[in-house]
Image (spheres, rainbow, N blue to C red):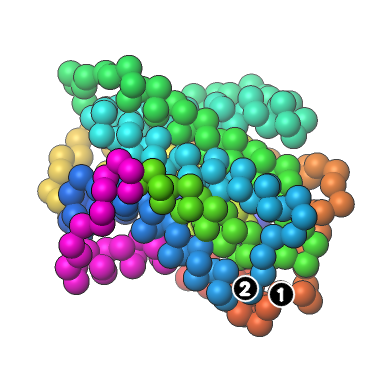
Amino acid sequence: MSRKAAVVALTALAPISWGSTYFVTTEFLPPDRPLFTGLMRALPAGLLLLALTRKLPQGAWWWKSAVLGALNIGAFFPLLFLAAYRLPGGVAAVVGSVGPLFVVGLAALFLGDRPTVKSLLTAVAAAFGVSLVVLKAGAALDLVGVIAGLLSALSMSAGVVFTKRWGRPEGVGALALTGWQLTAGGLIILPVAFLIEGAPPALTGTHLAGYAYLAFGNTAVSYFLWFRGIERLSASSVTLLGPLSPITAAIIGWAALGQALGPVQLLGMVIAFGATLAGQLGPRTPKKPERAEQVESTGSFSSAEQKVQEVSMDLEVSGVRR
């Protein structure tokens, strides 16, 4: 397996993990607490990574981390949950699947990546495939929900592009940068969650187990792999891994919840997965914007972060082949 294929495979684990969010939320968490769930996903994971890496932002990276944390977490989570509550799940997923088209436009504007016919066609094909997987006849539309869904997709897309544009500062690894963003995003959600939803609900052992999975496996590890992939792949390649999330959710719904999965859904999976694969075909090394901060740090990580980097490299070399 080539190095690029290994990076793609590891990055793909993030949207695959996110595809389990709906199942975990409905089966393990208290109902009707979307903002509290977003808070519990982001803030504990961010604080854990801060404790492991023992690195804080310096200089301009205080505001850059806040911006990235807002785009990738703090604004994205509430808008996503608002869309999910105002729209049927299938409609929300279809609205969110326009993210690759947003990335094509934003990458042209901020990264100098000229859009190609291939990038546009694969983005459209991915959205069409997702619509076949999740959209049901007679699905109702809600203007507020549609706007929230579009804004959530735009927020995440802008997060991908600016994460790619700014890279990371010298001597700081992807694990620390992930911790900064998750912490900033969680702190943004914190007052909103308490103002809108009130005090936290009483939690059972099942709830705590669900939140632990969301915070650490579904968020800390997944976002580390996601941001690391953004650094090593083109913005369009990364965002075209997104359809793996609704595909995974549909498969889990069929296997664990007994939800129907007919020929139309299977055709949609094939189209969306084909668009995802097509989005990964291209130059082995993507064009990187010129900036002094984009460097590979090898000796300045804390011991905990260095260990994670070593394990990640081992996975790339051997573990992904299993």
Q: Which residue is mark 1?
A: 301
Q: Residue at x 63, y 25 (%)?
A: 105
Q: Residue at x 43, y 65 (%)?
A: 44
* Main secondary structure of the magenta stretch: helix
Residue span colored magenta: 194-221
Q: Is residue 205 magenta?
A: yes
- Indicate whether 41 appears above or below 244: below
Q: Is residue 214 toward the left or the right of residue 199 in the image?
A: right
Q: Residue at x 67, y 41 (%)?
A: 162
| Numbered label attached to residue 53 | 2
Mark 1: secondary structure? loop
**If the image is split into quadrants, where does the N terminus sit?**
bottom right
Residue 319 rendering spot, x and y as whole percentages = 53, 73
Q: CA distance from mark 1 to mark 2?
A: 7 Å
Residue 76 rendering spot, x and y as whole percentages = 46, 40
Q: Is residue 246 visible?
A: no
| Numbered label attached to residue 92 | none
Q: Is residue 39 magenta?
A: no
Q: Identify which amino acid the numbered label 2 is placed on.
A: Thr
| Picture quadrant of residue 164 | top right
Q: Residues within 10 Å of mark 1 (few under 14, many from 20)?
A: many
Viewer-side residue, 223 vs 82: 82
Q: Identify which amino acid the numbered label 1 is placed on.
A: Phe
- Indicate whether 92 appears above or below 61: above
Q: Residue at x 44, y 56 (%)?
A: 42
- Indicate whether 148 appears above or below 170: above
Q: Is residue 117 toward the left or the right of residue 285 in the image?
A: left
Mark 2: secondary structure? helix
Q: Are marks 1 and 2 in contact (CB under 8 Å)?
A: yes
Q: Is residue 218 toward the left or the right of residue 164 in the image?
A: left
Which label's residue is closer to the chain start, 1 or 2? 2
